[in-house]
Image: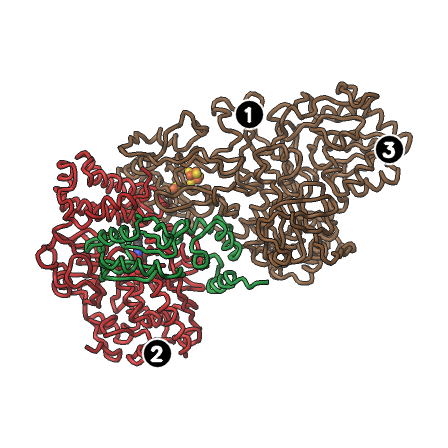
Chain colours: A green, B red, C brown
Amino acid sequence: MAIDTLYQEIQTEIAKYPDRRSAILAALRLAQTKYRWLSPEAFEEVARCIDLPVAQCQAVASFYDMYFLAPVGRHVVEVCTNVSCCLVGAPDVVAAFERELGCALGETSTDGAVTLRAVECLGGCGWAPVVSVDHRYLEHFQPGDAAQVVADLRAAPAEEH
Amino acid sequence: MQGPTYAAPRPDAILLDFEGERQDIAVYETAGGYAMARSQAGRPFEEIVQELKDSGLRGRGGAGFPTGLKVSFIGKGSRYLVVNADESEPGTFKDRELMLRNPHALVEGCVILCNAIGAGAAYIYIRGEYATEALVLDAAVAQARQRGYVGATLPGAPGAVEVYVHRGAGAYICGEETALLSSLNGERGQPTAKPPFPAVSGAWASPTLLNNVETVATVPFILAMGCKTYSELRTEQTTGTRLMSLSGNVARPGNYELPVTATFGDLIDGCGGGVPAGRSLKCFIPGGSSAPILMPDQLDVQIAVETCAAAGTMAGSGAVIVIDDRTCMVQLALRVADFYRHESCGKCTPCREGTRWMVELLKKVESGQAQRAEIDLLLELCDRMEGKCLCPLGDACAMPVRSYLQHFRAEFDAHVEQGGCPGGAASPFGALYPELKRSLPLVPA
Amino acid sequence: MSTTATNVVTVTFDGRDVQVPAGTPLVVAAAQVGVEIPVFCYEPRLGPPIGACRMCLVEVELGGRPMPKLQAACTMTAADGMVVKSAATSEQAKEGQDAVLEFLLLNHPLDCPVCDKGGECPLQDLTFRYGPATSRMTLAKRTYEKPLPISPSIVLDRERCILCYRCTRFSSDVAEDGELIARERGAQSVIATFEERPYVGAFSGNVTELCPVGALLPTPYRFKARPWEIVNVPTVCQGCPTGCNTWATVREGRAERILSRLNPAVDEGWLCDRGRFARHEPLADRLTRPLLRGADGLQEISFAAAARTIAQRLRHVDSLHGAGSVAIVTGGSLTNEEASAWGRIAADVHARTASGPVAAAGAWERLDPFAARIDDLDRADVVVVVGDADVTDRAGVLDLRIRAARRRGAHLMIVSSGGTLLERDCDTFRPVAAGTAAASLQALVADPGPLVGATHPVLIVTDPIDLGHVAAAAHALGLQERGGVLPLPTGPNERGARQAGLAGGGDEVLAAIESGAVRALVLLGVDPTADWPEADRWQAALAQTEHVVTLSPFVNTSVSWSHVVLPQAVDLEREGTTTNLEGRRQRLRAAVKPPSGVADLAVATAIATHLGIEIARTAPQESEPPPRAKPGRATKAPAIRAANVTAGRFALVAPRGLFTGPAVERTAALAHQRAPWVMLNHGDAAALGLSEHDRVTVRHGGGEHTGPLRTSRRLLEGTVRINWAGSPVAGEAEVVRA
Ligand SMILES: Cc1cc2nc3c(=O)[nH]c(=O)nc-3n(C[C@H](O)[C@H](O)[C@H](O)COP(=O)(O)O)c2cc1C
Ligand code: SF4
Ligand code: FES
């Protein structure tokens, strides 16, 4: 029988807590790393691994912003549009990405390479504007930087988020 | 400039005033790190509580609650330490830099506090977006484990201490302590009614000490320099230094560690170099986006808890956002309110419905379609939300909007009179609309 | 902990003093002095208050100092010297109340005239009483697709929902099925199920009673009645031996709805979906007239003729063939009064009797020294559940009481082959081979685990095993001195029937029929070819019996083998008493008339009269469970037969579930609850190359069962579990991909 790595990884997380339920965020994250988004099947797998009702996994996942409940591109570009970033030009960064990707916020480029999202404060306000690419921060981001980032992402294989 | 050594720390610069980073435990130990973890491991609970009380340390998470008092409240039974590393209040980024550059200060603080309260484990709840920081902390914990600070019993300590890094998944409300605990328990991150307070029933229904990253990381330094030295640097009710996150329309944004006696002017003009040339200061947010704004004539307000309160605002998370004259306050209000609407957990009625209504009203005002009476309605809505919600998030939405209305009512009226934004394209948020309107308003039309 | 005088505190509400135990929620304390504080989310049966709706905001002064903010009177508890002002006397509280009501109505569709909740709706009442809550919202209300069936029995209207979280708390904190959830966050939050799949949970219907608005409604009751046209009749559910108290909502002679009727000792105000939704319908299917087999098959006759015929035949057989030539058998669907009439008849015609499939599993008297009551679970520190059947399979709401005990801190131990609903969150799970409940009890005596040192342990046995095993274990575990046992009968009033003189088991009667000793068989509301094990043998037995008399609401296999048939009344048509699993006698009231127009008791009395027995009419009496008997000598446990499973086959676990039987099969609203499934151990499934949801067929002694696969890491390897609705089967089975 093939080793069920997701199951094993989730058990490692469960071991950190007095109650297995606490591992739910980690379990969902690990499943998302494996499948890129949380499909109904992914939820069911998580539910079996952590032995909780599948609806509970979805109830939890849908509360948080970082779980994808619909398919996403191979990469995810998130632009902070909160106050500090906007004050120093985040709207122009958004516009630059929309141009480069040919898609609007909340959408995925037609080649499936990149999903573009606007997000709330990422905690990088001192180095604004901040863009997070597959959960790595790019700071002092200028609209002119978008082209290179998009080109790199189009060329790069899928990242584990 | 070489940072202070721990043997003789300066009370005015302890957390970040060194070059580079101290992710490597050897570097941290060379600087005197973990000495307190070792020497304080066997110290009785009461002594440490007294030391913290005498230091005057107040929580750095936002509420400014006296830390020693909080530690003294901890209930009996198996206990936990939970560190609030959710840092999500817009404008705040101090805990992040602290964890990146000085992670062992936090780990050492955890070990000390766990041993003091007899907790077997500390859980650092770090916001999900801080993926890099979580890895840095994981590595720091692993190093501390190798050196026997974590996972082993230090001489004199009541037991071994485990430190776990628990990653969140994107929800501002999880910074609120009871919501954080719900989330840690694997639930939707919704706040719960207090009492019971975490000190009595927190993580896994056990007595739990919950503190902010900066608060915990400060503990080793206080013990090293002694509460007396630490508390010498003080205003009437606040002591020590604070990490201030400076951002917005300012020449040199970043984190600055300032004594609590410093003024916002010291920070914005002194450290930050003031607003960029050619512009002028319109107002500033003193303690995260939920804090009521202060006006240019209030630059001499000290950054301490009680001085901010006296000025009608709050020290909050120490996040100062500088706003220059181009900014449309209606757009700012909409942007801020929409953040809180997006982050409202949906549990209690006034916050869930009030934030949504507030955003809808502000959209109407911003686009010039509102009646004048609806601006008054905005103020009434603030009344109807403030003080009625389960947790302070509803207040956090109402307070800033109310302060914008108080100071800049004319701008709101102008939108109604001119049928749109008078500042228009010049405002930094201008370009966000209509984009933001298209993508962010998740409220069905 | 006892409430001593020092724990009593004085609180003042709108100028009125009240003394309550410290820690009493303010809403409760206020009600004691007639101060009404409106609530939506507060419902103490759902666990600690959550303070979500904020409807109950009040002004509070403590120690002479006003608290800075309004406080939620549901989460704030009484402390000495507290002065509380409700909206009646406080401007500030009134402002809070108005604000919350306005917020709640912002998105509410205000479609009361077409809402089934209208007239019974707390939101409507509060708006009416505390208005004017004029809305100043000039913007579009939230709209959703509606109504959304969240199962065949429940519809959800998200526009009406006020997000009080009562329903989701019930699902996660009371039923613990976790199926009904809040999805999304903030103003976008909605009540939902996973992927909008049906809410499958034995207790789902309770959410329709908990919902304080018309957001969750029982589908069968939609647009059926308005509150002023209905009468609510108090009665007792006959779906299982728990005996939950109910209200039957009657309109124009039809029972349109069943509601819970709180009895803290029994049901804590909950019902299971069988009790709530199962109906013996359609009426057209019901037997309404007695039938007599003649040359042309079964022909209608009068009740009088039927009674006379039955009496004559029983008397005839008894006098011709002697004692034991008549057998009178029931399954627990009689009232105590009916059972007692039949018990008298049985004695008169020297009949063999049975009230359940297994004689020894009904020998309750052996357990008298150890008998526990349902509310012993409230005091239990350890609860041990032994048996492959899930508690819900046999006694719906008892499952909720066990869960409540665990939440209160009792240690829950499950001894079974696994895959039951209860073991997911238990404290100790002891996996044992399928069908070994009796042996497991012996093993429990040898290794009592958490029972060591327990002061009030309750032992529950779900499988219908020889109660001699239970008695022996109870004795050895010392349960005569602490806690007690609660075995689960197979029929709703099996205990009452046995006490009324119809003791014995189907196993003994079957053997007697096969031996030729029985010439006349009376089946009272039981179809042994469907309800009891050995269906084939029963069918042959019926075929060989000279006289078969059957009492049944519907045509079934036994009816087709009968010579005389009597129509039986069902739950809501019966008057009398019933005895639940703990021995409590409760009153049944006829909410509607039986379609035959004649009460079953009248027919039994008529038969008795023909036999010369006088059945006195007595008013039905309710009573508490009887007190415990004095402990006797230790009972010796009967011998245990070990079963072996052939290599390559699976041990079969097929307990007859809650959602089986004629009424359930006829209820469309329960279709989703009885959808077949197959459960295998995770590893076994992988070894067979099967994955979750694959369609799998299980072939066993009773036939074939096909359904989607569920895998479990707790179900014992080598075991297959199915929700088989046919006659009870055990033994081994073959598992193949369908
Ligand atoms: C809506 C809301 C968000 C909060 N977010 C944070 C946060 O991100 N980080 C933090 O440390 N405290 C946050 N707090 C404050 C915490 O509830 C809590 O007071 C603090 O973590 C306690 O630690 P301290 O005593 O060390 O300050 C927040 C509070 C509220 C009401
Ligand atoms: S559906 Fe009813 S019970 Fe559930 S949250 Fe909405 S209003 Fe409350
Ligand atoms: S009843 Fe108190 S908040 Fe809902």
Quarter of the figure that contains the C terminus of chain B: top left
Q: Quadrant of residue B352?
A: top left
Q: In the picture shown, does residue C351 fall above or below A8? A: above
Q: Quadrant of residue B33?
A: bottom left
Specify the label residue C250 is tagged with. 1
Nearer the N terminus, badge 1 or badge 3? 1
Q: Nearer the viewer, mark 2 or mark 3?
A: 3
Q: What's the CA distance linking mark 1 and mark 3? A: 43 Å
The chain letter for the residue carrying disc 3 is C
**Badge 3: residue crowd in 10 Å (few <14, some 14–19, many ≥20):** many
Q: Which residue is mark 2?
A: B39
Q: Which residue is mark 3?
A: C519
Residue C53 position, x and y percent, is 37, 41
| Residue C279: x %, y % from top left | 61, 31
- Using the rendered view, name the quadrant where residue C381 is placed: bottom right
Q: Is residue C726 above or below residue C683?
A: above
Q: Type of residue at label 1? A: Val
- Circle 2: element type: helix
